[in-house]
């Protein structure tokens, strides 16, 4: 299982890098649906990772963390796929452009603000379980790294709270979702796990 997880995991990393390199060109051509489809495939490549880590770290309590990790990935794959169809269909509607732009905003608010942020909270919970498991394995570096990633649960929770309230709390409303932070945290998180599973676990 480790070998296939490594192969698929690095395919996911390669897809992210390819997407980052071609994003400007695709965006200019309004191919946002295709971008989301590639992202859906990218997250799908990481589906075996929570199971592989849960099995290799051999900590019984990590089963709970593994569930959160899998649910996170499945939620993201679903929302990316739904956004793909909606964005492509909307881009083809040259008539009533203003109406469809309004529908795009509505759909994206529905599928991103609460849904994706909740999924990221689940990822942070998974990171907490991973951090504890790594500490128990005396792997201080990975334990510290996962602890650092888990702290983002505060950021995600504030964003979720803001998007769920009709009248957001004033001092919390200053915290806005930032796609750059989301994407940077995602690639660093999975890159860290892939390096660990490739160069540490595979050598055991």
Image (spheres, rainbow, N blue to C red):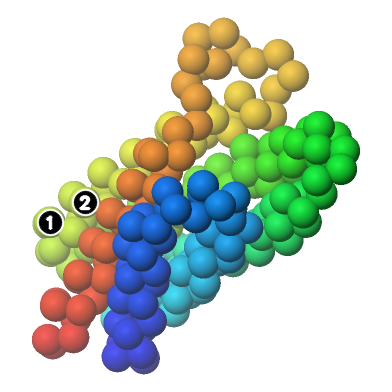
Please state which of residues 104 and 154 is positioned toward the viewer in this rendering.
Answer: 104
> Which quarter of the image is occupied by the C terminus?
bottom left
> Can the viewer see residue 9 in this picture?
no
Mark 2: secondary structure: helix
Please state which of residues 75 and 95 is positioned toward the viewer in this rendering.
Answer: 95
What residue would you read off at disc 2? 145
Q: CA distance from mark 1 to mark 2?
A: 6 Å
Tell me what residue is drawn at x 44 percent, y 53 percent.
Answer: 25
The residue carrying pointer 2 sits among few (fewer than 14), some (14 to 19) or many (20 or more) residues within 10 Å by Cα, namely some
Q: Position of residue 143 (x, y in %)?
A: 20, 55
Tell me what residue is drawn at x 58 percent, y 62 percent.
Answer: 34
Q: Is residue 92 left or right of residue 111?
A: right
The tag on residue 141 is 1
Do the CB atoms of the residues marked 1 and 2 lie less than 8 Å apart? yes
Q: Position of residue 126 (x, y in %)?
A: 42, 57
Q: Is residue 114 above or below residue 57?
A: above
> Can the viewer see residue 145 in this picture?
yes
Quarter holding residue 62: bottom left
Q: Is residue 193 left or right of residue 203?
A: right
Tell me what residue is drawn at x 69 percent, y 29 percent.
Answer: 164
Quarter holding residue 82: bottom right
Q: Is residue 57 above or below residue 90?
A: below
Tell me what residue is drawn at x 36 percent, y 77 percent.
Answer: 11
Q: Is residue 173 above or below residue 157?
A: above
* Extreme residue toward the top, this view: 170
Please state which of residues 88 and 198 is positioned toward the viewer in this rendering.
Answer: 88
Mark 1: secondary structure: helix
């Amino acid at each position: 299982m480790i070998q296939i997880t490594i192969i698929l995991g690095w395919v996911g990393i390669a897809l992210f890098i390819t997407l980052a390199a071609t994003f400007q060109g695709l965006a200019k051509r309004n191919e946002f649906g295709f971008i989301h489809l590639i992202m859906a495939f990218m997250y799908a490549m990481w589906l075996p990772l929570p199971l592989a880590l849960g099995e290799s770290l051999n900590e019984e309590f990590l089963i709970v963390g593994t569930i959160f990790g899998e649910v996170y990935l499945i939620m993201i794959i679903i929302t990316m796929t739904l956004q793909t169809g909606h964005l492509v269909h909307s881009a083809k509607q040259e008539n009533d452009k203003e109406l469809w732009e309004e529908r795009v905003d509505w759909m994206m608010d529905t599928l991103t603000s609460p849904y994706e942020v909740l999924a990221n909270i689940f990822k942070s919970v998974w990171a907490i379980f991973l951090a504890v498991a790594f500490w128990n394995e005396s792997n201080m570096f990975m334990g510290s790294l996962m602890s650092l990633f888990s702290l983002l649960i505060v950021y995600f929770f504030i964003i979720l709270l803001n998007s769920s309230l009709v009248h957001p709390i004033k001092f919390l409303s200053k915290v806005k979702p930032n796609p750059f932070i989301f994407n940077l945290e995602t690639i660093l998180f999975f890159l860290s796990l892939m390096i660990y599973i490739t160069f540490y676990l595979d050598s055991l």
